[in-house]
Image (tube, grey):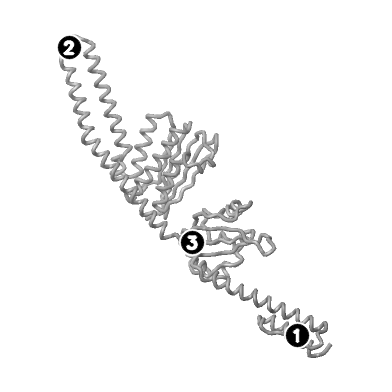
């Protein structure tokens, strides 16, 4: 073996280890075994050059796309992140690499990676879902997550690619629309309640008064007096029912006294009309809130109670209104028959729950519904103080 060929091989390997794949080894006229080795190293250099260009091209795309992209291994540990996720999250690259995906998720969303594993465990290639990213400063970014499996060139599973499109502006716009809709509904319900009370209610009261005046006249026919009594009772029941409708549409006590007083009134009516034991507890000196939020909180409680009366066999109901430093919480729990939570995926089965979710979303709230067959149902709703 000539010294020059040994040096040739050594120089080639040093060049390739430094990333200089353009260097080629010189093959002698002898074309012996050493030349064959040099030729093989040259071919390796060409392949490394091609592969390295592809990696650089991919890396360039990876770091210039506006969507946030992370690559996680099978356990949810981040192997790579693009520049967009660094810019949005406020974390440095070294903070994210080798950290778990849960670092970017809220406390309520810590099971999100398990959902990714579950959704993609069979032959499903990808799935898309809305969720949230929490920045280093605690700011919420609403995102459309597209999750897919990654395989190497041999077809072996190699982790997950998770792409997140920032839809925060879109979600804020949706919330504004929802608030407008809810505000319009409340205003219309209040108008209808006032119209019913001021027009039809007064007319019914006047009609009842006139019927009562018939009792002053002496009539020998007892059947006539019986009819007068029956009409008086019917009119009285109609007025009572009209007042209940007006209360359901927009309780005057809610507008004047706030959500706590309105719930106390609702609980009192519930105890009288239904055989249900209600335990209502509220933070001392529970504050007045802005009117739209008070109406939404009251409607949520009303919706939960209506669902309980219609679908449950509950005899006990617990309601709590709690004020903390930065949150307002509503908690309700009943001991009825419960239901299968899996049925909520069917649109026809979850209209009431969906209505609650819509109201909560409009005011940046969070809610958690739990139900167990034979045990009962509970709902916790939290709103940030504004």
Q: Furthest residue to the top?
A: 220
Q: Residues within 10 Å of mark 3 (few under 14, many from 20)?
A: some
Distance between mark 3 and mark 2 Cα atoms: 82 Å
The mark closer to the camera, 1 or 2, is 1
* Residue placed furthest toward the right: 1
User: Which one is earlier in the sequence, the residue at label 1 or at label 2?
Assistant: 1
Q: Earlier in the sequence, mark 1 or mark 3?
A: 1
Say whether disc 3 or disc 2 marks the residue closer to the N-terminus: 3
- When asked about the image quadrant of residue 176, the answer is bottom left
Q: Is residue 68 left or right of residue 242?
A: right
Q: Are marks 1 and 2 in contact (CB under 8 Å)?
A: no
Residue 94 placement (x, y as % from top left):
58, 70
Pinpoint residue 69: horizontal percent, then vertical percent: 54, 64
Residue occupied by mark 2: 219
Q: Residue at x 68, y 61 (%)?
A: 155
Q: Whole-Å distance between the Cαs marked 1 and 3?
A: 49 Å
Q: Residue at x 79, y 81 (%)?
A: 36
Q: Secondary structure at mark 2?
A: loop
Q: CA distance from mark 1 to mark 2?
A: 129 Å
Residue 351 position by quadrant: top left
The residue pinned by badge 3 equals 165
Q: Are marks 1 and 3 in contact (CB under 8 Å)?
A: no
Left or right: residue 357 compared with residue 257: right
Res 10 label: 1
Count of numbered badges drawn on the protein: 3
The answer to whether the residues at label 3 and label 2 have Cβ atoms under 8 Å apart is no
Quadrant (top left/top right/bottom left/bottom right) for the N terminus: bottom right
Q: Position of residue 22 (x, y in %)?
A: 66, 83
Q: Is residue 216 above or below residue 357?
A: above
């Amino acid at each position: 073996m000539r010294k020059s060929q040994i040096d040739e091989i050594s120089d080639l390997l040093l060049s390739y280890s430094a990333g200089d794949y353009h260097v080629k080894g010189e093959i002698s006229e002898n074309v012996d075994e050493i030349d064959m080795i040099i030729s093989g190293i040259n071919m390796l250099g060409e392949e490394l050059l091609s592969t390295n260009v592809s990696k650089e091209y991919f890396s360039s795309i990876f770091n210039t796309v506006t969507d946030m992209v992370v690559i996680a291994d099978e356990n949810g540990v981040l192997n790579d992140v693009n520049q967009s996720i660094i810019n949005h999250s406020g974390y440095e690259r070294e903070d994210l690499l080798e950290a778990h995906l849960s670092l970017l998720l809220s406390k309520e969303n810590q099971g999100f990676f398990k959902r990714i594993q579950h959704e993609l465990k069979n032959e499903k290639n990808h799935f898309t879902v809305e969720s949230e990213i929490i920045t280093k400063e605690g700011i919420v970014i609403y995102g459309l997550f597209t999750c897919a499996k990654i395989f190497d060139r041999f077809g072996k599973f190699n982790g997950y690619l998770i792409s997140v499109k920032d839809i925060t502006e879109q979600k804020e716009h949706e919330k504004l629309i929802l608030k407008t809709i809810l505000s319009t509904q409340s205003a219309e319900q209040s108008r209808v309640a006032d119209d019913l009370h001021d027009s039809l209610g007064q007319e019914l009261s006047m009609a009842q008064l006139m019927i009562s005046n018939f009792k002053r006249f002496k009539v020998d026919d007892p059947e006539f007096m019986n009819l007068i009594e029956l009409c008086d009772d019917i009119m009285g029941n109609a007025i009572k029912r009209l007042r209940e409708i007006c209360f359901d549409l927009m309780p005057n006590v809610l507008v004047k006294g706030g959500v706590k007083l309105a719930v106390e009134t609702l609980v009192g009516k519930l105890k009288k009309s239904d055989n249900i034991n209600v335990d209502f507890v509220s933070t001392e000196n529970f504050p007045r809130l802005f009117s739209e939020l008070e109406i939404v909180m009251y409607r949520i409680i009303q919706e939960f109670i209506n669902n309980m009366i219609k679908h449950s066999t509950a005899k006990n109901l617990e309601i709590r209104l709690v004020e903390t430093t930065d949150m307002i919480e509503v908690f309700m729990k009943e001991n009825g028959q419960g239901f299968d939570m899996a049925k909520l995926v069917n649109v026809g089965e979850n209209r009431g729950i969906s209505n609650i979710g819509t109201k909560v979303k409009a005011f940046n709230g969070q809610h958690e519904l739990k139900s167990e067959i034979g045990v009962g149902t509970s709902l916790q709703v939290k709103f940030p103080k504004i």
